[in-house]
Image: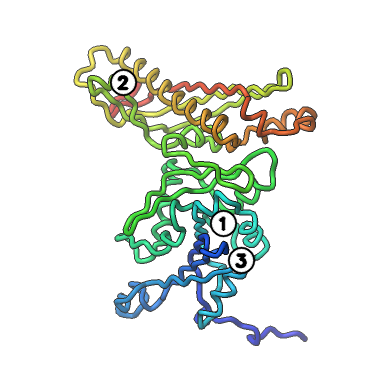
């Protein structure tokens, strides 16, 4: 009879649990690997009295290596317990490293089974280590603050939901390019409202918070965040539109070996704020706001497409995946989807309907 035992047990107290990893470029051309390790007895609420020990709630340890794994092995030599990355939630990569090449980093993460595919990939403007060391006032651990911010932004439609596994899939395809979160970090604050755009294994640029909105509508078919629409800026007339329901239809066609896309987005929502002083004709006002909101969204979409097609040459909209599925024979004859996408005719139209204006219904 075979009996289970505890001869190979690994107690959690004998592990250094890594919550985040930062990857920077070293001075000698190697990588500078940093890990954030929480200190349990310093975290508020972890003791019987309900408070911490008054010191730092975490420690950041840094070492170098020619590869990610070598850097982690060198870090192990500086810690008294076994490094465990099974609970790691954030992988931060400096923009310098991301713009150079991330193939070796992704390879190391992908081969080591203890790295979870649900990790959040973040490209950091400046040093990635800053994301591990900044001091948010609302949380003891920077990683917890970043995790909560990403969850909230995803729920509100400010950012799409991404994971390291999504990057794996995109990098293994010829039909789409990978994206990651993009952050700017200061001593006590983090601005996490942009997306890093990759072409192949290199970062080529980023999208700002407004350019992300059409991406969420087309790629994720989500509502996106509230938008403030200029009706008459000279008279300081604006309305805030809150989208409640979004339906996206993409029509893809091949004509003369060139793809054409007609993207129609239907949105229902409500007005949460208006600076109109007096509304004389409510019906006319409603139509005016609907048309202005649709035009505003279409302007954002045009700006996003211009950047993706002419500047970055990166299909992060997953249009290539759509073409391959609908036209498999034509796809086999395509030598470079990057070139076709950059020259494709893509038209985006919005149909906006306002269903509520405060306490009134239409």
Of pointers 1 and 3, the one earlier in the residue sequence: 3
Marks 2 and 3 in Cβ contact (< 8 Å): no
46 or 320, nearer to the observer: 320
The residue where tag 2 is placed is: 231
Q: Tell me where residue 263 sits by quadrant.
A: top right
The colour scheme used to paint the residues is rainbow
Q: Residue at x 40, y 51 (%)?
A: 184
- Residue appearing at x 54%, y 69% in the figure: 64
On screen, 296 above or below 284? below
Work out whether mark 2 precedes mark 3 in sequence or the reverse, and give the earlier one.
Answer: 3
Task: Categorize mark 2 by other alpha carbons within 10 Å: few (<14), some (14-19), many (20+).
Answer: many
The residue carrying mark 1 is 118
Up the image or down, 100 lies above or below 327; here it is below
Which quadrant is the N terminus positioned in? bottom right
Q: Tag 1 or tag 2, which sits nearer the N-term?
A: 1
Which image quarter is the C terminus in?
top left
Tag 3 secondary structure: loop
- Marks 2 and 1, Cα distance to the nearest angstrom? 42 Å
Quick one: 276 or 244, which is closer to the camera? 276
> In the drawing, what numbered circle is on residue 83?
none
In the image, farthest residue toward the front: 28
Q: Are marks 1 and 3 in contact (CB under 8 Å)?
A: no
Q: Identify the residue position indicated by label 3 in the image.
A: 66
- Is 80 drawn above or below residue 169 in the view shown? below
**Residue 337 x %, y %:** 69, 33
* Mark whose residue sits in front, 1 or 3: 3
Q: CA distance from mark 1 to mark 3?
A: 25 Å
């Amino acid at each position: 009879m075979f009996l289970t035992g505890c001869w190979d047990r690994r107690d959690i107290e004998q592990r250094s649990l890594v919550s985040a990893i930062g990857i920077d470029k070293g001075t000698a051309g190697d990588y500078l690997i940093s890990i954030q390790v929480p200190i349990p007895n310093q975290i508020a609420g972890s003791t019987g009295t309900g408070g911490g020990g008054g010191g730092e709630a975490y420690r950041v340890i840094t070492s170098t290596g020619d590869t990610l794994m070598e850097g982690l092995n060198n870090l192990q030599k500086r810690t008294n317990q076994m490094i465990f990355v099974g609970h790691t939630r954030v992988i931060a990569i400096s923009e310098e490293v991301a713009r150079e090449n991330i193939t070796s980093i992704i390879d190391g993460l992908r081969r080591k089974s203890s790295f979870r595919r649900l990790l959040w990939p973040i490209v950091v403007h400046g040093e990635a280590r800053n994301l591990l060391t900044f001091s948010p006032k609302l949380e003891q651990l920077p990683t917890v603050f970043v995790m909560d911010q990403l969850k909230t932004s995803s729920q509100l439609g400010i950012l799409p939901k991404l994971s390291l596994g999504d990057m794996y899939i995109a990098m293994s395809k010829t039909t789409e390019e990978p994206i990651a979160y993009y952050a700017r970090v200061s001593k006590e604050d983090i601005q996490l409202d942009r997306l890093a755009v990759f072409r192949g294994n290199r970062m080529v640029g980023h999208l700002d918070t407004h350019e992300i909105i059409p991406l969420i509508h087309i790629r994720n078919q989500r509502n996106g965040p509230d938008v403030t629409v200029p009706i008459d800026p000279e008279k300081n007339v604006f309305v805030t539109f809150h989208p409640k329901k979004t339906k996206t239809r993409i029509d893809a066609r091949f004509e003369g070996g060139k793809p054409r896309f007609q993207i129609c987005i239907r949105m229902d929502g409500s007005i949460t704020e208006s600076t109109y002083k007096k509304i004389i004709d409510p019906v006319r006002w409603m139509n005016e706001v609907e048309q202005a909101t649709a035009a505003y969204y279409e302007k954002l979409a045009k700006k996003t497409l211009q950047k993706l097609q002419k500047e970055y040459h990166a299909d992060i909209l997953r249009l290539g995946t759509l073409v391959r599925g609908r036209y498999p024979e034509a796809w086999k004859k395509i030598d470079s989807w990057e070139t076709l996408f950059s020259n494709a005719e893509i038209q985006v139209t919005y149909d906006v309907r306002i269903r509520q204006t405060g306490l009134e219904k239409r």
